[in-house]
């Protein structure tokens, strides 16, 4: 039976690790992965990639990205099986591999990045609606923010009503957002012109630089399109079967990869690269309209709206779960570990959405607020990926859980973990020094929350020696970032 919270008459409880609650089926887990990966980015992908690379370098870039990301997906799959004792992989793997403070920062950074991403979804959503309702134009008008606030709290209420209910709605939303994407791919596959696709295949006359430079630029665009691949790992505790975590991760990744490559590749066979590069946001709409007429743009706009609604729900679910598990085991304050009678992480959700609401209001008060917040948060979510891959590599090197298995399995896992770790390093480096410096500004305040949690646990020592070193480095980088911002050497936007 779940442990009751000390406060009288409270409806909140702490999850007992011996009790499986809120179990989610494989389709629900798969929808969490796909739903969190597909937001608004895929609808702008034709223009984004065309601005960076010609078809040849694009194909090379997708190949490298696909290999790196499938290895990362396989890391989550293998860790779910080899370490079934660890729930909420994005946090638990970092903690198990590198200690409490690193695990805390993995959860803290992921949570901040995710909630700020939710603000971005809301701004983009009402910016899209603004094409039809002028009062919402830009997504950060007073009316747009009021409407976005209502939507945020309605979604909050849905998740509070129960994880399984919210996961079911997310499954429906995920199916709905896939329809316009599949429609786009089917129509463009028929209209695909090989001549358009192969013209200046390597970009010799595009003015985009060498093949290597184009491939690198294209890969910088793809850094962000797979965020959400860890969704099933975060909800591992609620999976009906532990093996479903790996199935959902690999299946969701492969499905989204096919959609991304399909949208990107086929677009370059419909319009010339230079024309694609000049399209506005949600460029899929213009590509489809060039084939079928105006209704193509309307379909894509509807797809963007549905996709962003679904992504908002998926990421609010992930935000709550990301903080609940570390709150339950004492790495976060106990407050975050509580759940309500519907088994939803109520306090974590309230705190998440109150902070999101504050950020949303800031988009009205300061035109550059959203871009600044996005810049601050961009690099945060990549660090947990690197930590997960590094933990898998550490396990292979030390031979943990490989004592009785065949040597060939350990060798295969070593290759996968090494590639995933190297790709994780690439992701962090690709974010850029400026983004990493600014990210430290958000990591550093988390130390106070970590101290709060440790004092609740009555820990004799809050920071281990190496954790003090990490804290000092964060502080020094943060001070340098502040100095650079004040002197104009570093911009928030």
Image: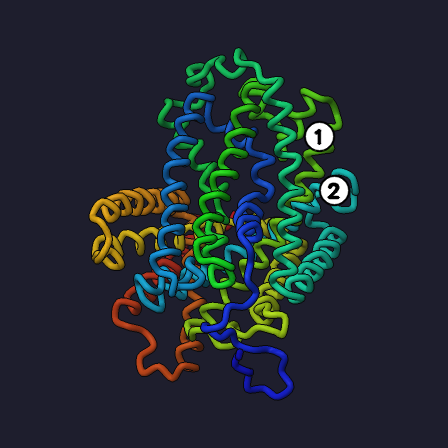
Q: Is residue 297 visible?
A: yes
Q: Residues within 10 Å of mark 1 (few under 14, many from 20)?
A: many
- Which numbered disc flags the more N-terminal residue, 1 or 2? 2
Which mark is on residue 130? 2
Q: Is residue 429 visible?
A: no
> Where in the figure is residue 433, as x and y percent of width and height?
38, 47
Q: Report the Cα–Cα distance between label 1 and label 2.
A: 14 Å
Q: Is residue 173 left or right of residue 396?
A: right
> Where in the figure is residue 459, as x and y percent of width and height?
35, 81
| Mark 1–mark 2 CB contact (< 8 Å) | no
Q: Is residue 68 left or right of residue 149?
A: left
Where is 356 relative to 430, above or below? below
> Where in the figure is residue 387, as x and y percent of width and height?
35, 55
Residue at mark 1: 297
For image coordinates 70% across by 36% down, the residue present is: 301
Q: Nearer the viewer, residue 236 or 156?
A: 236
Q: Secondary structure at mark 1?
A: helix
Where is 446 relative to 360, above or below? below
């Amino acid at each position: 039976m779940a442990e009751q919270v000390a406060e009288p008459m409270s409806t909140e409880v702490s999850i007992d690790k011996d009790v499986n609650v809120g179990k989610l089926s494989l389709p629900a887990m798969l929808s969490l992965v796909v739903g969190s990966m597909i937001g608004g980015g895929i609808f702008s992908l034709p223009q984004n990639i065309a601005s960076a690379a010609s078809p040849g370098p694009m194909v090379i870039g997708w190949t490298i990205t696909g290999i790196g990301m499938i290895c990362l997906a396989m890391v989550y799959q293998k860790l779910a099986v080899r370490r079934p004792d660890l729930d909420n992989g994005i946090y638990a793997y970092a903690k198990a591999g590198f200690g409490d403070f690193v695990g805390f920062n993995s959860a803290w950074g992921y949570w901040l990045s995710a909630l700020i991403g939710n603000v971005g979804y809301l701004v983009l959503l009402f910016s899209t609606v603004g094409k039809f309702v002028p009062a919402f134009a830009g997504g950060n008008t007073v009316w747009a923010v009021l409407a976005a606030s209502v939507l945020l709290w309605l979604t909050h209420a849905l998740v509070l009503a129960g994880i399984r209910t919210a996961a079911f709605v997310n499954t429906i939303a995920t199916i709905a957002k896939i329809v316009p994407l599949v429609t786009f791919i089917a129509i463009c596959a028929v209209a695909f012109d090989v001549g358009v696709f192969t013209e200046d295949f390597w970009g010799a006359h595009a003015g985009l630089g060498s093949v290597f430079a184009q491939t690198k630029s294209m890969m910088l665009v793809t850094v962000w399109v797979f965020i959400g691949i860890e969704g099933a790992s975060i909800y591992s505790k609620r999976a009906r079967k532990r093996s479903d975590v790996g199935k959902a991760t690999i299946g969701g990744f492969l499905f989204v990869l096919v959609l991304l490559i399909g949208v990107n590749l086929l677009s370059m066979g419909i319009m010339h690269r230079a024309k694609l590069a000049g399209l506005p946001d949600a460029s899929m709409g213009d590509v489809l309209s060039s084939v079928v007429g105006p209704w193509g743009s309307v379909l894509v706009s509807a797809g963007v709206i549905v996709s962003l609604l679904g992504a908002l729900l998926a990421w609010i679910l992930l935000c709550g779960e990301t903080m609940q598990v570390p709150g339950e085991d004492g790495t976060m304050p106990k407050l975050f570990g509580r759940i309500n009678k519907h088994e939803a992480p109520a306090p974590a959700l309230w705190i998440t959405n109150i902070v999101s609401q504050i950020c949303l209001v800031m988009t009205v008060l300061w035109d550059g607020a959203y871009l600044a917040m996005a810049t601050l948060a961009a690099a945060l979510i990549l660090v947990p990926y690197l930590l997960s891959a590094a933990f898998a590599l550490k396990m292979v090197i030390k031979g943990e859980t490989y004592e009785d298995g065949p040597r060939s399995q350990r060798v295969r896992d070593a290759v996968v973990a090494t590639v995933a770790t190297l790709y994780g390093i690439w992701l962090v480096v690709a974010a850029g020094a400026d983004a990493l410096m600014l990210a430290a500004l958000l990591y550093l305040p988390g130390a106070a929350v970590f101290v709060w949690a440790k004092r609740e646990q009555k820990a004799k020592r809050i920071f281990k020696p190496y954790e003090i070193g990490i804290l000092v480095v964060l502080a020094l980088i943060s001070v340098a970032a502040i100095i650079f911002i004040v002197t104009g050497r570093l911009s928030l936007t």
